Amino acid sequence: MNSDQLRDKLSSSFIVFENELNGERRSPLHQKRRAAMERFEMKGFPSTRDEEWKYTNLKPLLGTDYKIFHEGEQSLEFREIKRYFLNDIDTYKIVFVNGKYSSWLSETTHRGFDICTFSAALQRHRHVLDEYFGRSDEEPSSTMDLNTAFAQEGAFIRIGKNAHVDKPVEIVHFTTADAGPSFNQPRNLIVLEEGSSAEVIERHRCLGEQETLTNAVSEVFLGAQARLSLFRIQNDAPQAGLIDHTNIHLSRDAHAHTATFSMGGRFVRNDLAFFFNEPNATAQLDGLSLLDAGEFADQHTLVDHRVPHCESREFYKGVYGGAAKGVFNGKVMVRPQAQKTNAFQENKNLLLSEKAAVDTKPQLEIFADDVKCSHGCTVGQLDEEALFYLRSRGIPEHESKALLLYAFGDEVIQRVPLKALRQRLHRLMAQKLDVDFQLNL
Amino acid sequence: MLSIKDLHASVEETPILKGVQLEVKKGEVHAIMGPNGSGKSTLSSVIAGREEYEVEKGSIDMDGQDILELSPEERAHLGIFLSFQYPVEIPGVSVTNFLKTALNETRKARGQEPMSAKELLRLMREKMELLEMDKSFLSRSLNEGFSGGEKKRNEIFQMALMEPRLAILDETDSGLDIDALRIVANGVNHLRSKDNAVVLITHYQRLLEYIKPDFVHVLYKGRIVKSGGSELALELEAKGYDWIKEEVEA
């Protein structure tokens, strides 16, 4: 199998998918799918010749004979997967096992707001899908098009005017060994109407040793004064690949906070885009990559200031050990009409070994003159003086290094307001650094 | 307790220590004085195990055990403590978390049970009182934004908690006003016992008014060229180092 063969397989799979749709084939939604498939077939998978994929080679992931559709239903017991959820706090849960919704593991609601699935929304909220589906990107990438073509399941969150979701929403996608190597295309739609708010946590988890490639899309639309927090825990199994596209549209006075924690997996590519469509909206983009061995994570962000008086603050950190490789590409676009924009970007990286590497590329394109914009990026190593200081106090070398890295990463974790999530992230970080710290930082 | 014999050490191919001899016994306080660039800080760094220094010849034994092959943390576990001349700022690591980790890692290495949070807090409070420190200090990032005096006091606070058998104070007095000096000296005197030893590395006699040494050594050009009792410090204060230099060159 190579990438051309995989593309052919996807094309024929699309025909099979269409044939099963019957009357649905003529719906506006499916017309969007078909147009997306045509674009994907034209463009194919991205290669390192594409500017946006210059540092990121997808090819090694395209040599597997993935299953495009999952057959049958796989059930999981809650106790087997309990550890992938937050404990101590109650949450809504939207859980998928091998691409199919698991009502058994989920806790959804239609009371006051809709926290359910894409497939349920196809039945109950068709008008919402017709309005928003596929609308978040004017120039979708080929992988986003691919997802659109096959979109049939994922999370659907719609919060009505002035409603506040009373507890966080966890979206978890599991794949199991029974499914074999699989290519997954989950599709989320999040619509927060005027004055509403929600907190969402998403993760993908491969159970078993099969190779998986997940090509996910989240479309997010925030009405005036809406507030969204969107957290990602990306510490999947060592053979799992993830391409995530998240497009967030902000109306007047809206606020979005994203925090992305990439701490494992074979391959992670995050395409995260913010679009300011009305004035006075604010965005905070936080990220931490903590990688070792042969792990790879590419944090690709776009902040598009299209209107005046908006503010974006971006803060990404990276720690790369072993032969890990990271990419940070932060594009900030300030269009001519976007006066009084505040846009700040910071990217700090630590390399822990000779073989580790990071490509960092701040990309500010500013076409307005009355703006405040800044960016900074650093690539460094652990401070030897600090290391000696800690060791001279009896803290062994491994623990001393971990303590410094823990403090480095904690600066991002502290930005998460949800305590239960912070605790989980601290635990994951200690686990990743192979130390048994019980620190209340 | 500490026995240094014919110690030669260099940094980046420049020889700094050229045959240091020093015997420190339990219960003793030694002062090492000397002009700038004589190798005082190098000596303390080599004892603590800083890796940039290369020991070419000689030995350092602690209770008869050769420590030159030991890592800095192993030396700390044997009870060696270095109060840094320039304590390092470590953002993001609070004083409490640092001390908790340091104390419990040291206890672990010695085969002791970790200290409970309650016990630890009680101990920290007690030592903070001794050093007249404010409670808010515990939640601050280690040395970050500390004044010179606060950093030095923090070093002595750590020393008081770790209760080392051998404390090496590298120019702990520099940059301290008279009140801070008194507090720091009080902390050191509190630690003194018949089982512990202290090595004070200093430029000036001032600190020795508060911590009375049993022995004073003059380090010059990488060697201890003169040793005496506490009266030697007074003589140095009065006459400077030139007469020592002349004696050595002669």
Image (cartoon, coloured by chain):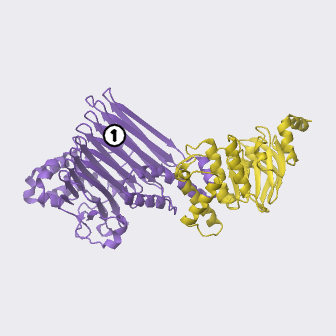
Chain colours: A purple, B yellow
Mark 1 surroundings within 10 Å by alpha-carbon count, few (fewer than 14), some (14 through 19), many (20 or more): many
Image x and y of residue A225, in percent? 23, 45
The kind of residue tagged 1 is Ser
Q: Is residue A67 left or right of residue B215?
A: left
Image x and y of residue A173, in percent? 29, 62
Q: Is residue B25 left or right of residue B135?
A: right
Nearest the viewer among B28 and A271 is B28
Q: Residue at x 46, y 52 (%)?
A: A410
Image x and y of residue A310, in percent? 29, 37
Which quadrant of the figure contains the N terminus of chain B? Answer: bottom right
Q: Would residue A16 be seen by someone viewing this image from the given angle?
A: no
Mark 1 falls within which chain?
A: A
Q: Secondary structure at mark 1?
A: strand
Nearest the viewer among A59 and B246 is B246
Q: Residue at x 34, y 44 (%)?
A: A284
Q: Is residue B14 left or right of residue A171?
A: right
Q: Is residue A19 left or right of residue A102?
A: left
